[in-house]
Amino acid sequence: NAGVTQTPKFQVLKTGQSMTLQCAQDMNHEYMSWYRQDPGMGLRLIHYSVGAGITDQGEVPNGYNVSRSTTEDFPLRLLSAAPSQTSVYFCASSYSGTPRQYFGPGTRLTVT
Amino acid sequence: GESVGLHLPTLSVQEGDNSIINCAYSNSASDYFIWYKQESGKGPQFIIDIRSNMDKRQGQRVTVLLNKTVKHLSLQIAATQPGDSAVYFCAESPSGGSNYKLTFGKGTLLTVNP
């Protein structure tokens, strides 16, 4: 199986544009999450989901929306991109009951 | 080890030496700890984990040590190889219903010199 996949790999946006970062997993994991990674800041949790139809905010949710209509997919939406959202975004998933998360390859987003 | 600030802590070792990467965690209620390896341009990759009821766990060429008294975690890599060059993150997770959430440290850059 492919594990956790993310598209696109790279994206450049202008301030105010919107876009959706895609994440999919084929491991039937209940838990999925989105992180952003900035230099010197480690990974910070944006939003997470413990199952289809259930989402919740993480540490840095402002400016981002998520939904989870299926077990496999967990898209992250930027409604109005800002330069402060320039970052590398990682999606991760895990089985229920374990924090051991598996990460996708990341999306590098630049907002000008 | 981990530190606050914009610059990653770095560790430089010779190929074949043993490496020790340290991490101080903040939450005494954390129940589960994980080490991840991140190579340039890739996502974090699981290395090894340990629960709070253990103080040592071994994997293939790696050992994790947990000292709950001083809230310290370390990753030991035996016979370090050039392919081990990467950023290493520790992550902690609380006990209870929110055990899905991970809080990551800021990472340590390991450079292995041939």
Image (cartoon, helix red, strand yellow):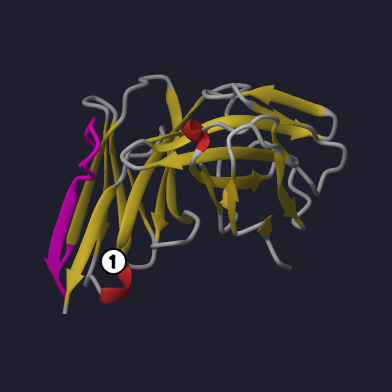
How far across and down, in percent of the image, does residue B12 sit?
14, 61
From this viewpoint, is residue B101 visible?
no
Q: Could you classify mark 1 by the number of other residues whose Cα lies within 10 Å: few (under 14), some (14-19), or many (20 or more)?
A: many
Quarter of the rendering containing residue A64: top right
Region in magenta: B1-18
| Frontmost residue, A45 versus B48 | A45
| Frontmost residue, B93 versus B59 | B93
How far across and down, in percent of the image, does residue B108 sit?
26, 48
Q: Residue furthest bottom?
A: B114
How far across and down, in percent of the image, does residue A17 sit?
67, 37
What quarter of the picture does the N terminus of chain A occupy? bottom right
Relative to B95, residue A102 above or below: below
How far across and down, in percent of the image, does residue A68 sit?
81, 36
Relative to B112, residue B96 above or below: above
Q: Which residue occupies 80% across, 49% down?
A: A72
Q: Which residue occupies 26% across, 75% down?
A: B82
Q: Which residue occupies 36% across, 46% down?
A: B89
Residue for badge 1: B85
Q: Main secondary structure of the magenta part?
A: loop
| Frontmost residue, A1 versus B49 | A1
Q: Horizontally, is B84 left or right of A5 in the view?
A: left
Quarter of the rendering containing residue B38: bottom left
Q: Horizontally, is B5 left or right of B64 in the view?
A: left
Q: How many marks?
A: 1
Amino acid beneath label 1? Ser
**Disc 1, SS:** loop
Relative to B60, residue A83 above or below: above
Relative to B28, residue A98 above or below: below
